[in-house]
Image (cartoon, rainbow, N blue to C red):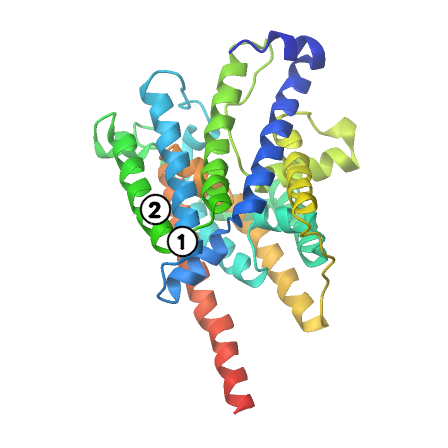
Amino acid sequence: MDFEFLISLFGEAGATAFGGLVLGVLFGVFAQKSQFCLRAAVVEFARGNIGKKVAIWLLTFSAAVGGTQILITMGELDISDSRMLASYGSLSGAIAGGLLFGVGMILARGCGSRLLVLAATGNLRALFSGLLFAAVAQASLRGVLAPIRDSVAGAWLLHNDGGLELISFLGWGSYTGIYLGAVCMVIAIFYGIKNRLTPWAWIGSIGVGSMVVGGWWFTYSLSYQTFELTQVESMTFTGPSADTLMYLLMPSGAALDFDVGLVPGVFLGSFLAALLSRELKLQGFQDGQGMIRYIIGASFMGMGGMLAGGCAVGAGLTGGSAFSITAWIALASMWAGAAITDALVDREWKVNQDVSVN
């Protein structure tokens, strides 16, 4: 697709940011209407139930994986130069960061993208946690926490000697990604029907996954039409949240790019969806103890997301669709960290509450 008009209207950087904004708005609408949330899916699964939340996550994941792999196989997309498949990957960062992020999203009751979506509906807890998440991510990237991140991430590296992309690493065929996406979609459809998902849950969950595909396609297509280097990327919220925060605080010190357009777009899309559905509602902290929990959770996610190379969407959907080895390891670690934390914190708390009531 020719983006010459968009480039002439906004400039190269502006066109990239505008694309992020548009895709972000759609992502926000779909995420709000489907109630897509990795934390909720992990909790549901860990408690022995494959219900609506798991079905929604599976639909989203399979749409992202299947769509991305179809474009790659057709020769319409090349993500080999993306950050996900760069010169080296951090296995130590994927494991430690994934576990830390999983713990954090249970404590904060949502991952980075979910906090952004909830904040747009009037949830002040999510707004506070999201801002802290972005601040800690920035501190982990370029601030006082950067040395710790570098030390952990550098402990175990996987070099690009033909082994950062899972399918190639295992020596599987070029259609493997499509087959796996299709199998996952069949399973997702089965559980979607079994759990009687609403029409918006179907549309929204597949829509969220499709925005991952859209992000890949847009940035890849634009990279061939700009003189300046355009990073081939898609949906992720750890780095973009940090970049957007810095852009708002110091516009001259941050670049206008896809990420900076994405975060405001998701917020706007979620707000509009909630407004039209009459779901806007102010919510705040009930006590100081609850606030401490959110502070710890958001901080863990900020550091964890930077270590893992992405959040529940960045590593889980975008990295998963690219079959990045470190992204798949990070996603598995997020599931493990979240499931363990739910068992030790939330379920234990509920049991104690029930005992005290009786």
Q: Position of residue 113 (x, y in %)?
A: 58, 45
Mark number for residue 204?
Answer: none
Q: Amino acid at mark 2?
A: Ala
The answer to whether 11 appears left or right of 91 in the picture is: right
Q: Report which residue position mark 1 lands on.
A: 196
Identified at 62% across, 34% down, the residue is 25
Mark number for residue 188?
Answer: 2
Identified at 76% across, 36% down, the residue is 248
* Distance from the alpha carbon under mark 1 to that under mark 2: 12 Å
Residue 92 in view in this figure: no
Q: Does residue 54 lie above or below 340 as drawn?
A: above
Mark 1 / mark 2, whichever is N-terminal? 2
Q: Does residue 152 lie above or below 51 as drawn?
A: above
Q: How many marks?
A: 2
> In this rendering, which labeled residue sits more in front, label 1 or label 2?
1
**Quadrant of res 7:** top right
The answer to whether 276 appears left or right of 346 in the picture is: right
Secondary structure of residue under mark 2:
helix
Identified at 64% across, 51% down, the residue is 118
Q: Amino acid at mark 1?
A: Arg
Q: Position of residue 61 (x, y in %)?
A: 40, 41
Foreground: 57 or 173? Answer: 57
Secondary structure of residue under mark 1:
loop
Identified at 52% across, 61% down, the residue is 106
Foreground: 194 or 284? Answer: 194
Q: Position of residue 289 (x, y in %)?
A: 67, 72
